Every structure is written in structure tokens, then in C-alpha cells.
């Protein structure tokens, strides 16, 4: 399932190429025909992510809420920002040749020579879901815009230059402003939306009153927004924290540290498009980490392998139906 950084990147893609544009909305699959008719012909005025949910605002305060869930994906084509480029400005680092070399996407064919203008809008096709992948347009697709919708497209949002097709979401609904607020009120703080200090206090309060393992609380979207299975495991390792420790028993400064680390990692994730959770990497190690998941994480999907710090075998156990990875020596 896409974690918070992916959803923020998708919202920024909309912010860059759809906000301010009049949108033709349709439901090629038919299942969202009524919802699409409420949006059709309106100007998109805002695009924002809160945790794993995205909210697109249209004029007259009509909103589209989308949660991709496990199978959902957005396919962008036309003039859209490339996957390899920076779609957001977190100010953490600039695009460089290294970024281009490290880009995890498949940039093929006619696009190779345009790497110098990485991130600039160009004619391409980009899938944004749990992973991002870019593909070259074939001749037929280059000729006709917009491309024919392929497969079960729940909703298509179209401008004169760009199109976004949504497939397989868990949630896709039209809401008014009050409805959006109701959804957001149930969500824990998101470091890219909430004020840093206020968000920290909210997360602290929500963890300290729960006699529930921190490994479960970090995945609870009402406690903190946007953390999924990868970030959960990695944040706990980075804090050298036992996933089974109860929230109510954790020292205040430990919980504050979790919020601050999530804030930092989310920024890196939005910036790179990858859940890069290892620090202090030299140039080559960083390049590898951006390319391969095996070189990117402390514990996630490393069960049975030696801990990078102490050499103990990483453990995997099922917690609330999801795989939890940790080092039984470092995280005590
Ligand atoms: Zn260890």
C-alpha cells in the first residue's frame, strides 16, 4: 500500500498540472458516473494529501476524496512531471546528475536524451502507486491526446494537456467541505500538513494514553498519518525501540523523537520518491539504496539476515495481520 510520501507526491503532481485548470471528469468504467458528473466542468482549486488520503478541491467547495488502498493507482499521461524529477519542493536537496543516475524509473526510448531537463513537464506516461514507473509513449499514443482509457478506469480527470486515470481505489467519493473535515478530524497528524509542534503534541497525547504496542500504534492512522509497514519497521529500528513496548509506557522524549524522525523521513521520501531510511551513506551507497530496496533499509524485508549494526538475525513476526521486522538485540 502506498505510504504517505507517495500520496504527497501524487497530490503535488495534481498541484502542478491540474490545479487552476478546468477539468473534464468522466468514469470510463461507469462505476463513478454520478460522482464524475458532479466534478465535470469545474476548475480544480487545490490538491492535498493527509496521510494516505488525497483530497482534490474543485470550485464551489466540491471535493474528491481518494484512498488508493492496496491496489489503487493513478496513471498520468500527457504533459506531466517525470517520475525521476522532483515533483515537490521540500528544499532538502537539489536535483543533480546523481539523482538522474539513481532514478529508479525506467526511462526509455525517445526520453533518454531529455534527462537534462529532468522533472520538466514532457509527454510521458507515469504510474503513481506504491511504486512509480514511467514508460515511453508508443507512436499511436503520441499522436492522439487524450489516450483511450484502458481497463477499469474509475475516474478520468482531463485537462487540455494532461490526463489522470484512477484505477482500483479503496475509496473514491465526492464530498462537501464539512465531509472532508469529518474525514480529516479522524486522522492523526501529518508532518507535511500539521504545524510541527502542534502535530508532535497530538501524536504524543494519542500514544501516551494507549496500552497498545508502539508497533501497532504507528500504523494506526488515527494516531499519526501516513506511516505504513515499511516506515513503521524502519522508524522503530532507527529509535532502537522494541515494537512490543506499550505506548503508555514510553518516555515522552522517545515519542517526540518518533514524530521528528517521521517528519524527516517523510521529507526525504517526498523528495526522492523512495523510502530511503538509512543515513550517512556515501555517494555509492546512496546510489545503490535509491536503486535497490535490499540496500535501502535497516530491517524491512531483511528477516534472517544479519542486523547491519550488531549482526543478530533480523526477526519477522505477524502483528495485526501485517509483517513486522525488527532486530531483537538492538531494539530492546
Ligand atoms: Zn541489531
Image: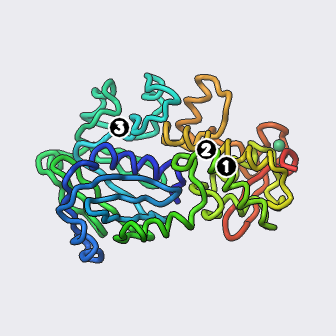
Q: Mark 3 against mark 1, which lies toward the viewer? A: 1
Residue under circle 2?
Answer: 196
The kind of secondary structure element at disc 2 is: helix
**Left or right: residue 264 compared with residue 118:** right
- Which circle's residue, 3 or 1, is located before the other in the chain? 3
- Residue at screen point 39% across, 34% down: 85
Q: Nearer the viewer, residue 247 or 241?
A: 247
Q: CA distance from mark 3 to mark 1?
A: 39 Å
Q: Is residue 69 above or below residue 281?
A: below
Q: CA distance from mark 2 to mark 1?
A: 6 Å
The kind of secondary structure element at disc 3 is: loop
Residue 296 visible in rendering: yes
Q: Tell me the quarter of the picture where residue 71 sits.
A: bottom left
**Left or right: residue 318 compared with residue 128:** right
Q: Position of residue 94 (x, y in %)?
A: 46, 25
The kind of secondary structure element at disc 1 is: helix
Where residue 200 is drawn, which disc sits there? Answer: 1
- Residue at screen point 35% across, 44% down: 134
Residue under circle 3?
Answer: 107
- Asked whether disc 2 touches disc 3, contact meaning CB atoms under 8 Å apart, the reply is no
**Left or right: residue 107 compared with residue 161:** right
Q: Is residue 200 above or below residue 52?
A: above
Q: Position of residue 142 (x, y in %)?
A: 16, 45
- Asked whether disc 2 touches disc 1, contact meaning CB atoms under 8 Å apart, the reply is yes
Query: How many labels, in total?
Result: 3
Amino acid at each position: 500500500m502506498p505510504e504517505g510520501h507517495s500520496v504527497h507526491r501524487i497530490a503535488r503532481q495534481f498541484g502542478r498540472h491540474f490545479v487552476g485548470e478546468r477539468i473534464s471528469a468522466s468514469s470510463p468504467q461507469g462505476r463513478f458516473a454520478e460522482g464524475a458528473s458532479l466534478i465535470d466542468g469545474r476548475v480544480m482549486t487545490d490538491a492535498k494529501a493527509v496521510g494516505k488520503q488525497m483530497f482534490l478541491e474543485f470550485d464551489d467547495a466540491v471535493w474528491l476524496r481518494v484512498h488508493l488502498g492496496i491496489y489503487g493507482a493513478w496513471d498520468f499521461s500527457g504533459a506531466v512531471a517525470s517520475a525521476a524529477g522532483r515533483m515537490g519542493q521540500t528544499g532538502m536537496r537539489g536535483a543533480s546528475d546523481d539523482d538522474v543516475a539513481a532514478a529508479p524509473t525506467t526511462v526509455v526510448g525517445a526520453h533518454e536524451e531529455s534527462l537534462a531537463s529532468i522533472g520538466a513537464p514532457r509527454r510521458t506516461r507515469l504510474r503513481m502507486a506504491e511504486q512509480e514507473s514511467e514508460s515511453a509513449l508508443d507512436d499511436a499514443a503520441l499522436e492522439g491526446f487524450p489516450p483511450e482509457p484502458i481497463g477499469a478506469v474509475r475516474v478520468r480527470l482531463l485537462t487540455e494537456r494532461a490526463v489522470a486515470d484512477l484505477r482500483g481505489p479503496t475509496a473514491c467519493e465526492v464530498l462537501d467541505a464539512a465531509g472532508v473535515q469529518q474525514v480529516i478530524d479522524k486522522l492523526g497528524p501529518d508532518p507535511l500538513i500539521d504545524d510541527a509542534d502542534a502535530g508532535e503534541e497530538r501524536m504524543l497525547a494519542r500514544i501516551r494514553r494507549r496500552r497498545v504496542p508502539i508497533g501497532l500504534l504507528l500504523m494506526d492512522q488515527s494516531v499519526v498519518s501516513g506511516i505504513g509497514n515499511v516506515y513503521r519497521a524502519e522508524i522503530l529500528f532507527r529509535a532502537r525501540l522494541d515494537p512490543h513496548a506499550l505506548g503508555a509506557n514510553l518516555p515522552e522524549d522517545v515519542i517526540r523523537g518518533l514524530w521528528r524522525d517521521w517528519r524527516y523521513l517523510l521529507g526525504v521520501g517526498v523528495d526522492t520518491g523512495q523510502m530511503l531510511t538509512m543515513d550517512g551513506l556515501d555517494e555509492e551507497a546512496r546510489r545503490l539504496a535509491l536503486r535497490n530496496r535490499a540496500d535501502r533499509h535497516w530491517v524491512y524485508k531483511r528477516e534472517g539476515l544479519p542486523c547491519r549494526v550488531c549482526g543478530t538475525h533480523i526477526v519477522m513476526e505477524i502483528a495485526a495481520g501485517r509483517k513486522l521486522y525488527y532486530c531483537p538485540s538492538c531494539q530492546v
